[in-house]
Image (spheres, grey):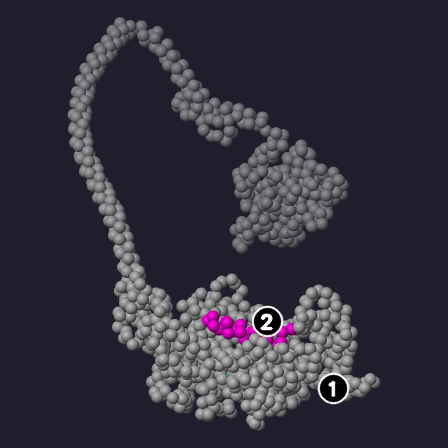
Amino acid sequence: MALHLGAQYILEHNVGISDAVLLHPLTEEAFIENIKKRFSHEQIYTYIGTVVVSVNPYKKLPLYTPEVIEEYRSRNIYELPPHIYAISDEAYRSMRDRNLDQCIIISGESGAGKTEASKVIMQYVAQVSGKGREIDRVKEQLLQSNPVLEAFGNAKTLRNDNSSRFGKYMDIEFDFKGDPIGGVITNYLLEKSRVASQIPGERNFHIFYQLLAGADPTFLETLKLSPKPENYGFLNRSGCIKVDAIDDAKDFNMVKTGMEVIGFYRTEITEVFQLVASVLKLGNVEFSHRSNADGTDGCDISNTGEIAEVAQLLGCLEQNLTNALTQRTVEVKRDKVKTDFSVAGAVYARDALCKAIYSRLFSWLVQRINDSIKVKTEQTRKVMGVLDIYGFEVFQTNRYEQFIINYCNEKLQQIFIELTLKEEQEEYIREGIEWIHVDYFNNAVICDLIEKNNVGILALLDEQCLLPGNVTDKTFLEKLNQTCKDHPHFESRTLKKNQSDRTLPHDAFRLKHYAGNVTYKVDGFIDKNNDLLYRDLSQAMYACRHNLMKKLFPEGYHKALDTQCLVNSLRNPSQKSLKRPPTAGSQFKASVQELMKNLLSKNPNYIRCIKPNDDKQSGTLDLEIVKHQVRYLGLMENIRVKRAGYAYRQIYAQFLYRYKMLADETWPSWHGDVVEGVKLILANQKIQQDEIAFGKSKLFIRNPKTLFDLEETRRERMHFLATLIQKVWKGHVKREHFLLMKRSQVVISSRFRGFYGQKQYKKKKAATLLLQCCTRRWKARKVLAELKHEKRCQLAATDIQKHYRGWQARKLLAELKHAKRMEWAARVIHKYYLGWKVRKNYKPKFRRIAGPKVARFMVVALKRKFLLNVRDKLPSLSPVDNKWPSSPKMYKSASDQLQVMHHKWRCRKYRRKLSEAQKYTLREKATASDIFKDKKVIYPESVPRPFKGDYLNIRGDMKWKKIHSLTNDINLVFADLVHKVNRANGKIVQQLLVVSSQAFLVIDHRTMTLKYRIPIEFIEKISLSPFQDKLAVFHMKKPENGDRFAKKGDFIIGNEHIIEIVTKSSLCVKNKTNTMPEISISPQCSGQFGSSAVQVSFQQGAKGLEPGIPGVKVTRKKHLMLISEP
Ligand SMILES: Nc1ncnc2c1ncn2[C@@H]1O[C@H](COP(=O)(O)OP(=O)(O)O)[C@@H](O)[C@H]1O
Ligand SMILES: [Mg+2]
């Protein structure tokens, strides 16, 4: 079966008989044959009822995968092929569902597979129980305790590469849901002698090799270790260091991780390894012989380096350690005397110390793990215990350890017999069930031989140990021979019955164990049972500064060696070491009894492990070896009792409670007699009479199948009931739901109807309102029409009345008018008549007198009218307002005169309002008008422009001020840039002309330097053309006796404001001389340029000239200066 192919596959391929109870014929041979057959097909498990018989396959089988676990989960034990999982599941479910504490007892020889079986159980429980962070942590801690304890407590032996050298019972604790919440581990008697020596081919405990192979070099250095196991006396003497199947380095890492997971502190881990290292190193300490002066033997440590390193590791004084290893204190009559060890004594003491350190370290580890995994809450718990204790051992030489181990196995066998053979058979009888007794060997007598108070071997050993004086193993044997000589299971060479037995040495005794005869050498029994360590050694260990070491040797606190310890000892008032400690044997006996009590309080499940051969070979099954085990395990008796007996029993009440649903009468409750109820159920299930038996208090069922059928039916029934409950519940829920829906529907429909009605009502209301409103409107319209008609009628009547009245009034008016006209006409006629009469009467007189009077009156009236008209319609006071009221023709001239008068009057009025400056300006303008009006073309355009005079604003100019301060020309009249015509060639240059009341000043406008000054009175005449040009010729007076300026002659100036220049200079001349200079306006003029007389002629019609200034072209030809202009 290379791969796991599913339980179905295994069922179909089942080989032999999986439950030995069904064997036929029932013989030992057939049973072994069956086991062999199955074994050869790798079917290593076989049932005897509910007991699992397991044969060690010595190879990995695909039987332990999570998938297989899933298949076995919650299945009946016989549904699937035999497996530890099946029994684990049964135990787990009984614990969880029926609240029965369980224990699984795994027994068998060393190497039969007990430890593996216990791991398989743990694996199963871990997988099927609940999940969760805390639960997983607990599971992990429980699982990790295995590699740690195996490292420290297992070793390679000849029978088993991973032999447990201690007994272990582990309680896994669960909460009510079946989830693991913690555990307690109990360890039993570690085989500590292994620390110091092993038989050839075996190894020391794994941890030593693991530490050397797996720890990193620096760590090893701090532990002062070398990585080679060959260097250590405790490891190299047996000749076995490496085991093929074991990877020490890998295991070391697992151990370290395991310790971390469990919750060891780092310092604790280091301390543990320091102790392991110191054990190794102490093992290397060697002694050399010394003869003392008093003739006694003494010894010295020959390799002091080693002891120094150990002292460093443990934090103690090297000398103290050396002393403790080479001397001991002996009390002689209350005096303490130090005596030296011989070399052999020292080696013994050294080994004893190492064994003590190691075994105490191991117990501390278990305790420490327990501290971590213990349940921390106070909740109720259910327990499942797994017992994996060393198997029965028979060696070439068997010593105290084997004796103890085998005693333990005897006790386990006892329990097995008690529960499966004896108790069961007794129960049948007690319950009054017909029973044919099955014979079996009850090993109680062997147990008694060993453990009985006062006379048992253990008691005798203790007695010997307590005896004062020279007690040796030999005296112990003598005592044994004396006391047990008649016991059928005890043999000794000194006894008559065995005197001829040469296989039995003289220093040994033989016990006929249930599993075979074992010869024990008494050598070392007393010592090992005493289990005493020299006090000096305990004290030396207690004196160490090493925390853990101190804890391991509390008895060393008395008479501490150094002061530090003294101080510590004061703090630690333990008085333990004063008392003699119990012997190893009595301790073990007590713990085994405790264990038995514990196991008996639980529901037992068995796994019986069988070793197929002695060579750890897979695939081979040695019939002899198996037969031997089958015998001493009492498997055949087991089968017989099972076969004859009943597979299952239960108290009636419990049975009724569990299966009451299988009969209509008992479900859901039965109030009658319990047995009657049970009978009803059984009858209902049609179970045959020979299948069951009615005990006094219990019901017995012969065949497990019947029980499983019952369970199956119960499951189905439960299913049915669950469905029924579900159905009823669902019906109830649905009905509730339906009722709710119905109520809701009523509410909804009522609400809807209400809403609908409301809506309809609103609609109707709206329609009614509309109708009402229409009707009212119609009615109102009707009324309105009537009213309107009435009104119209009224209006029409009024209209008619009005028109009628109008007509009447007009008629009356016409009549009145007519009457009036008639009256007026009569009056006119009368007037005319009177006039005619008067004229007729006074015609001659009128012509003479009245005519002129009337004519005068008429004339006066007309004049008056004309004048009043003029007065009322006078124009404004503005001199330029030309309006004047019209007048009759006959007053035309009067009107014109009045107009002139009025104009003059308003002009005078206007003038009066003027300032002096305005008056002067007006004078200038008037003068200009006199000069130029209708003479010069450009004059009209100059009229509206005011004469500004100082166009360049030079009055404030500093340079001008400088000039006029020299010339006294303070009254500046005009200043502007002018075009001056060069008299020689007619070229035009720009100069600054300033006219003051005194003179003409020509100034260089760039430098503001005076070029020349012509007094104003020198100007005699000014000539201008009537054309567009803006030039004027200024004629100078004839020069008189060296008149410098006059000599220069006339000059021609052109400027935009030429009208202003001419006007102003004329006025200045007039002011100065009281005569106006002559102003000629004609196209020709004659000038005097220096000494030559020149004819200046203005000509119009030149082309290509720009208008304005200069706008002219001046050419001189001898005595003719021609000024052309456009
Ligand atoms: N079910 C198994 N499948 C495979 N190998 C097993 C099985 N049981 C035991 N072995 C092998 O046998 C060896 C000894 O088993 P172990 O359980 O340590 O024996 P015990 O505890 O009874 O002394 C194990 O190291 C393992 O190699
Ligand atoms: Mg084991």
Kindly report which numbered mark, 1 or 2, lies closer to the viewer in this rendering: 1
Q: Which quarter shows the N terminus?
A: bottom left
Residue at image mark 2: 368
Q: Magenta includes 598?
A: yes
Can you tell which quarter of the image residue 710 is in? bottom left
- Mark 2 residue CB less than 8 A from any atom of ligand 2: no
What percent of the width, then of the height, locates residue 803? Answer: 18, 22
Amino acid of disc 2: Arg
Name the residue at 54% across, 68% down. Answer: 374
Judge whether 641 appears above or below 602 on screen: below
Judge whether 899 appears above or below 835 on screen: below
Q: Which mark is residue 1003?
A: none
Q: Which residues are magenta?
A: 581-602
Image check: 1114 left or right of 392? right
Can you tell which quarter of the image residue 998 is in? top right
Residue 218 can be seen in this image: no
Q: Nearer the viewer, residue 371 or 562?
A: 562
Q: Which mark is residue 343?
A: 1
Residue 339 can be seen in this image: yes
What percent of the width, then of the height, locates residue 500? Answer: 56, 94
Amino acid of disc 1: Val
Mark 1 surroundings: few (<14), some (14-19) or many (≥20) residues within 10 A: many
Disc 2 element: helix
**Which tag, 1 or 2, sits closer to the chain's start?**
1
Q: Magenta includes 717?
A: no
Q: Nearer the viewer, residue 219 or 494?
A: 494
Q: Are marks 1 and 2 in contact (CB under 8 Å)?
A: no
Q: Nearer the viewer, residue 560 or 422?
A: 422
What percent of the width, then of the height, locates residue 501? Answer: 56, 93
Judge whether 603 appears above or below 4 on screen: above
Whole-angstrom CA distance, mark 1 to mark 2, is 37 Å
Mark 2 surroundings: few (<14), some (14-19) or many (≥20) residues within 10 A: some
